[in-house]
């Protein structure tokens, strides 16, 4: 059985929702960030990066959210969670997910993880102050040019949707007013109506 290593209020929520959508049996293991369990020797054997999510499969561990989401889409192909039959459309989805991982998540991380980039307290405060502007810029690009609607990829739901949903839920904490992005706000409301999202959020909070 698959095992998802996760922590609440992290990007692991996207993988948790995707697993719920896939119909694939899985179990979860909570990594307690409050005790720095992500840096423990036991967890570092699972994911030497010391991050979540990590997905344990019968063939080994998969890390990095875009890779985990693509894997879930393939093993749950009967649920059509990605356009895996269309190479171009699949690449488009991967490009969207890669943008979230490499640009949006990094912009967000400067609010709470500035020590990754500097040991200077003043520099870290400057990074924090820049987050609302950077996140606004990222989400404006998504709102105006990347979100096809009603789902990320258009009429068809995909594993890109829980990933966007996860990041959109962080906007207020990053000092950004979600109402600036009405299409993304509508997408979030649409997501909240999905049973798999409700189950994942309940499981995450357990």
Image: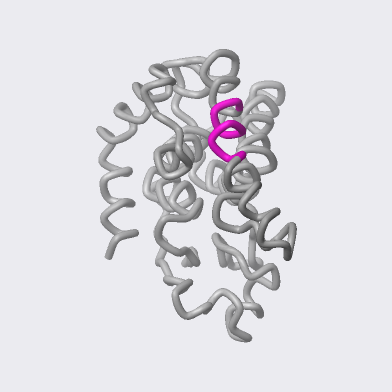
Q: Is residue 177 left or right of residue 44?
A: left
Quadrant the C terminus occupies? bottom left
Q: Which residues are magenta?
A: 130-137
Q: Is residue 135 magenta?
A: yes
Q: Is 57 placed above or below 94 here?
A: below
Residue 60 is situated, as x and y percent measured from the top left of the image, at 65, 68
Question: Coloured how?
Answer: one colour
Q: Is 73 placed above or below 58 here?
A: above
Q: Nearer the viewer, residue 127 or 146?
A: 127
Q: Is residue 146 left or right of residue 34?
A: right
Q: Farthest residue in the bottom direction? A: 41
Q: Nearer the viewer, residue 1 or 6?
A: 6
Residue at 31% across, 27% down: 190
Q: Nearer the viewer, residue 45 or 167?
A: 167
Residue 178 is situated, as x and y percent measured from the top left of the image, at 39, 28
Q: Is 43 placed above or below 53 here?
A: below
Q: Is residue 88 left or right of residue 145?
A: right
Q: Is 8 placed above or below 183 here?
A: below
């Amino acid at each position: 059985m698959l095992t998802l290593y996760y922590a609440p209020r992290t990007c692991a929520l996207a993988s948790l929702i995707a697993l719920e959508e896939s119909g694939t049996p899985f179990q979860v293991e909570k990594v307690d960030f409050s005790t720095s369990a992500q840096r423990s020797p036991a967890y570092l054997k699972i994911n030497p990066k010391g991050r979540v999510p990590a997905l344990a499969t019968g063939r080994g561990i998969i890390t990095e959210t875009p890779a985990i989401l693509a894997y879930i889409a393939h093993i749950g192909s009967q649920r059509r969670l990605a356009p895996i039959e269309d190479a171009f459309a699949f690449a488009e989805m991967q490009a969207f997910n890669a943008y979230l991982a490499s640009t949006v998540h990094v912009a967000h991380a400067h609010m709470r993880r500035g020590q990754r980039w500097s040991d200077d307290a003043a520099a870290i405060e400057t990074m924090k102050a820049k987050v609302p502007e950077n996140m606004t810029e990222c989400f404006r690009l998504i709102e105006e040019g990347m979100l096809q609607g009603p789902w990320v990829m258009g009429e068809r739901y995909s594993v890109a949707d829980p990933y966007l949903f996860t990041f959109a839920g962080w906007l207020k904490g990053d000092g950004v007013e979600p109402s600036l992005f009405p299409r993304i706000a509508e997408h979030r409301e649409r997501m909240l109506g999905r049973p798999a999202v409700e189950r994942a959020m309940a499981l995450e909070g357990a």
